[in-house]
Image (tube, helix red, strand yellow):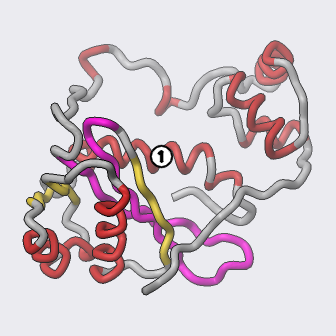
Amino acid sequence: MEPPVILRPRNEPHDLDSTFAALQHFEPHKLGMNLTRYHQLEISVSGIWRVLRRHNLNRLPRSQRHKPHKQRWKLYEKPRPGHCLQDDVKFISPIADHRKRLYQYTAIDDCTRLRELRIYERLNQETAIQFIDLVFDRLPFKVETVQTDNGGEFQSSFHWHLRDRGIRHVYIKPLTPRLNGKVERSHRIDDEEFYRLLEGCGRR
């Protein structure tokens, strides 16, 4: 059985301006928490706001700005825990001192938002099965349905493994990642609040 990989943010001081530029997607309160935890910098929220404004970084990225109601995707959630579990895999960009590719397997319950994730060095059905069995063991409720995209790691062996356990497996329509929106959004947050803080790790 392949052990999961553990990653931790770097803990090195940085030039203040470049640090603010890298973390501009955070709102000031969260940015202050990040500076304190990872960079040993104590700056008030008002001070953070002044620095952002001085460098013209006080506007949210386009992807995070307010959208008119008509342009938003319709929000939905399942009525009970375990009714639907969204499962997906995220490729992690190369990290310093780690030559192998890394993949983050993530599962999130549509109702409760409980989330499990592990990082592995392989992207295949065997690893996907190993991960989903771990998720079933850890969740405090029975899973009725697992929802995935059409990736190669979720094909016949994975599909029939779930069926043998009495769990329904459904695929979302091709090219519609929004149908797995909760797990996709969690991956985006991981990018913004964790992976971009790792030395040598680009965004993906």
Which residue is disc 1 drawn over? 188
**Residue depicted at 83% across the width and 16% down the height:** 50
Q: Pick the quarter of the image with the N terminus.
A: bottom left
Residue extending farthest to the front is: 140
Residue 199 in the image, given as x and y percentages of width and height: 75, 62
In screen coordinates, is 162 left or right of 3?
Answer: left
Is 102 colored magenta in this rendering?
Answer: yes
| Quarter of the figure with residue 145 | bottom left
| Quarter of the figure with residue 52 | top right
Residue 170 in the image, given as x and y percentages of width and height: 11, 58
In screen coordinates, is 173 left or right of 13?
Answer: left
**Residue depicted at 25% across the width and 29% down the height:** 73
Residue extending farthest to the bottom is: 1
> Crowdedness of circle 1 by 10 Å Cα count: few (<14), some, many (20+)?
some
| Quarter of the figure with residue 135 | bottom left
Residue 126 in the image, given as x and y percentages of width and height: 30, 83
The stretch of residues the image draws in magenta is 84-112
**Residue depicted at 36% across the width and 67% down the height:** 134
**Residue depicted at 16% across the width and 57% down the height:** 174
Is residue 64 placed above or below 133 in the rendered structure?
A: above
Q: Secondary structure at mark 1?
A: helix
Q: Amino acid at mark 1?
A: Arg
Residue 140 in the image, given as x and y percentages of width and height: 32, 49
